[in-house]
């Protein structure tokens, strides 16, 4: 029997939510995450019907027909240079997640999981302060219901100076409303700081080495928490519900170029071989680049509650700094 997990992906406009989701399957497939290299999750996009009824045997008539899944369509749109997510609806994507390799045995026995991940325009849940954005009430109601029904929230926030952001009020309101809602399902909350590769642009060929160090991520997250009070209401939400599991993490859809190690510039150029240089053939060439980078963590933690080297709790970030980053 598969377990169903519903995950709401939220965050301000332009935080990189759709890109993060669009790179999730690649990240899981390539193992470009901070879990053990022996951990082999398999994430397969499925249809809504398969999610609702459990995977079903396709009728023979369907054998040769091929319809694009919503997830494939999302990826195609991203490759074509997609713009902001439309505010006219919220968008559900479905996956089947199973585990093999070095996963805790009790967790393996629980699986497989059927995931529903809900993407929406940032302006619906977290509009910028003072902006007059015309939105359909139906869409706001639909998203509110989805938020309260979800098992987990992945909150994507662009890695920036948090003391100057125009969405801190919206974030506080969102956390307060979740806290006050009586009927909610929420068990996990992941704050994912996006655009992580940008931090390393001046480090040239050392960029990837630093980005791969979990203590650097921890330092960045600690600094972000200390620099602003925009996370105070998330703390309150946590205090109000001791069963809620919260993690902070970092990620980058653009990732890094593996050979040259510097931040990658265009993740969607064309097709899966886009990162392969013409002169290089064979399996080795596929691992030339590391892109995306850690975009699996937010969703795998949201679904499984499984920590990687790059997921941190409030306690881990509030505690004494490691000596080398004090
Ligand atoms: N440098 C960098 N840019 C990124 C990354 N991920 C996304 N972007 C860019 O950020 C912009 C916004 O990305 P989206 O994925 O559309 O953001 P969104 O949160 O879905 O935005 P809305 O749908 O409008 O709420 C796009 O131009 C992306 O190409 C990343 O990891 N690094
Ligand atoms: Mg979007």
Image (cartoon, rainbow, N blue to C red):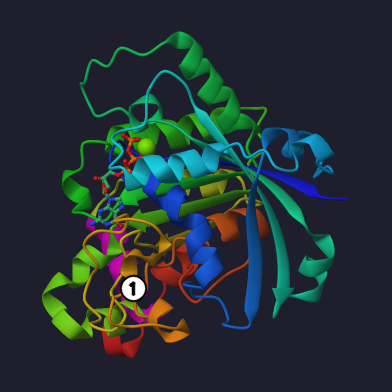
The residue pinned by badge 1 equals: 276
Is any atom of residue 17 visible in this view? no
Instruction: Specify the principal SS of the magenta part.
Output: helix
Say whether residue 284 is magenta: no
Figure check: 201 above or below 272: below
Image x and y of residue 241, in percent: 61, 46
In the rendered image, which quarter is residue 174 located in? Answer: top left
SS assignment at label 1: loop
Figure check: 246 above or below 27: above
Magenta span: 213-227
Q: Nearer the viewer, residue 242 or 37?
A: 37
Image x and y of residue 98, in percent: 72, 62
Image x and y of residue 321, in percent: 35, 80
In the rendered image, which quarter is residue 10 located in? Answer: top left
Image x and y of residue 119, in percent: 48, 36
**In what quadrant of the picture does the C terminus appear?**
bottom left
Left or right: residue 64 compared with residue 120: right
């Amino acid at each position: 029997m598969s377990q169903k997990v519903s995950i709401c992906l939220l965050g301000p406009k332009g935080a990189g939510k759709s890109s993060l989701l669009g790179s999730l399957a690649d990240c899981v497939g390539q193992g470009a995450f901070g879990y053990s290299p022996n951990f082999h999750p398999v994430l397969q996009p499925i249809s809504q019907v398969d999610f609702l009824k459990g995977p079903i045997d396709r009728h023979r008539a369907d054998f040769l027909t091929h319809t694009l899944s919503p997830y494939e369509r999302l990826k195609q749109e991203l490759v074509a240079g997609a713009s902001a997510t439309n505010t006219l609806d919220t968008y559900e994507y479905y996956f089947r997640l199973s585990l093999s390799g070095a996963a805790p045995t009790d967790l393996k026995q629980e699986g497989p999981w059927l995931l529903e991940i809900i993407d929406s325009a940032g302006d619906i849940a977290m509009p910028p302060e003072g902006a007059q954005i015309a939105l359909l009430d139906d869409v706001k109601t639909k998203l509110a219901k989805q938020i309260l029904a979800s098992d987990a929230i992945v909150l994507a926030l662009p890695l920036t100076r948090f003391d100057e952001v125009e969405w801190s009020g919206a974030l506080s309101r969102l956390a307060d409303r979740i806290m006050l809602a009586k009927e909610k399902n929420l068990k996990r909350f992941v704050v994912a700081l996006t655009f992580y590769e940008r931090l390393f642009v001046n480090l040239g060929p050392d960029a990837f080495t630093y980005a791969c160090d979990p203590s650097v991520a921890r330092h960045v997250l600690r600094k972000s928490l200390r620099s602003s009070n925009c996370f105070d209401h998330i703390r309150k939400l946590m205090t109000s519900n001791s069963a809620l599991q919260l993690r902070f993490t970092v990620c980058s859809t653009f990732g890094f170029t593996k050979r040259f190690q510097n931040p990658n510039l265009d993740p969607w150029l064309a097709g899966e071989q886009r990162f392969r240089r013409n002169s290089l053939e064979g399996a080795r060439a596929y691992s030339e680049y590391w892109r995306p980078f850690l975009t699996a963590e937010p969703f795998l933690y949201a679904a499984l509650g499984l920590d990687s080297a790059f997921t941190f709790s409030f306690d881990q970030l509030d505690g004494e700094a490691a000596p080398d980053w004090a």
